[in-house]
Amino acid sequence: MRKLIANRAANISPSLTLSITAKAKKMREEGASVIGFGAGEPDFNTPAYIIEAAKKALDKGYTKYTESSGILPLKRAICDKLKRDNSLIYDPKQIIVSNGAKHSLFNAIFALIEEGDEVIIPSPYWLTYPELVKLAGGVPRFVKTDSENSFKMTPKQLREAVTDRTKLVIINSPSNPTGSVYTRGELEALGEVIIKKDLFVISDEVYEKLIYEGKHVSIASLSDELYRRTVVVNGLSKSYSMTGWRMGYLAAAREIVAAIDAIQSHATSNINTMTQYASVEALTNPQGEQFLSEMLKTFDERRRYMVGRIKSIKGLNCCEPCGAFYVMMDVSKLKGKAFRGRQMDGSVAIAECLLDYGVAAVPGIAFGADDYLRLSCAISLDDIKEGLGRIERFAREVLG
């Protein structure tokens, strides 16, 4: 019998968190108390004015196909947003609206990467980046960053990672999972290497509205040359708590956008129509500023508490994130230790043992960082306090 599964599918890495998620779910079903730190979406509902806009769209009969790249009013609203917030000038023909920022990333990588092309990815990284590169036939090339430099890639690291097969670098600021935010100066220095080495950039900016210290800067805004080389990816999932609406977008040079438009037209056509009309409202209604301000204030309070509490626990540590809503908790001092007869040789084993204390966390190895667990701030402060108390008791049992 001939081979059934194509290599591009067979080579995708399975989720390292599924077993922990399944165990936590089973524990809850059996009545156990489990504090879950795995949330990858804001714990706020989508603002009412956005929901109302979707209802109005349905009432008006906006339920049919649209242009595959998105309706013109939405693309104009995105252009206005990019000009207002990021000092980036695009016209609607340079915008593609996709089924979430993840879909935008897939489209961009699929359009740019040939078989064997290398893509530089700073590590820790969002776990989907390398899988998308592999799906396109590319080769992920990881650059290991460290907490001393706030998990940010340096120009020297980028320069040394480039080979004659390197075509693309992915920059994620603010970052999932580390919360790191690149400054203008840091991006300018990386930009010099990118231009000199003739690379292209995907700039994932989906967390741009969630910054606590510093200011968001898009690398595409730094020069005409970087503008031409960069695909800016963003969406409304994190900023307006619209994860389930599946609205992402990208902006790029016309040649790149034309190729992506052709791909999307055959893969998915347009994203759902009512989401597009709701997204116009999200981007243009001034009520959004108040919603963002309140959400950011809440996340900041949780972030500050979480960082201070983790640093107070013997054997644990963390780097204070400047953006997003995650904290990478350093559990390296727990590695190699035994817990109730089980050897904890890495972040997966630590996370599995932590379930005994009713805490579910994401193993750092999923992000290329086996010395860490990722904790989300997108849960209530009461749950954060209770969960970190359990983590402290766990660490005390392990370390004595």
Image (cartoon, grey):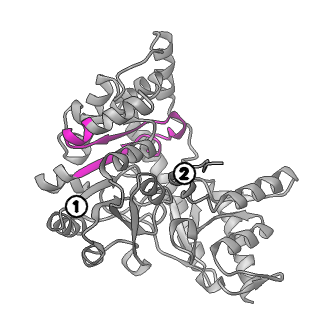
Q: Residue furthest left?
A: 224
Residue for point 36% across, 34% down? 97
Q: Find out whether residue 308 is within the magenta segment.
A: no
Which residue: 22% across, 61% down? 199
Q: Nearer the viewer, residue 142 or 282?
A: 142
Using the rendered view, name the quadrant where residue 91 is placed: top left
Residue type, label 2: Ala
Magenta range: 230-258
State the image coordinates of residue 288 (x, y, percent, origin top left): 40, 36
Relative to residue 277, is residue 156 drawn left or right?
left
Magenta stretch containing residue 238, yes or no?
yes
Callout 1 environment at 10 Å: few (<14), some (14 to 19), or many (20+)? some
Q: Residue at x 77, y 53 (%)?
A: 25
Q: Earlier in the sequence, mark 2 or mark 1?
A: 2
Q: Under tag 2, what secondary structure? A: helix
User: Which residue bears the numbered disc 1?
Assistant: 199
Q: Position of residue 22 (x, y in %)?
A: 75, 55
Q: From the viewer's perspective, is residue 180 above or below residue 51?
A: below
- Decide if residue 244 is on the left or right side of residue 93: right
Label 2 neighbourhood size at 10 Å, few (<14), some (14-19), many (20+)?
few
- Can you say whether 334 is above or below 193 in the image? below
Q: Is residue 333 above or below residue 168?
A: below
Name which quarter of the figure residue 66 lies in. top left
- In percent of the image, x 38 and y 34: which residue is there? 264
Q: Amino acid at mark 1?
A: Leu
Return the x and y of residue 361 as percentages of the image width and height.
65, 64
In the picture, measured across the screen, residue 366 lies left or right of residue 163, that is right
Question: Where is mark 2, residue-wise?
Answer: 9
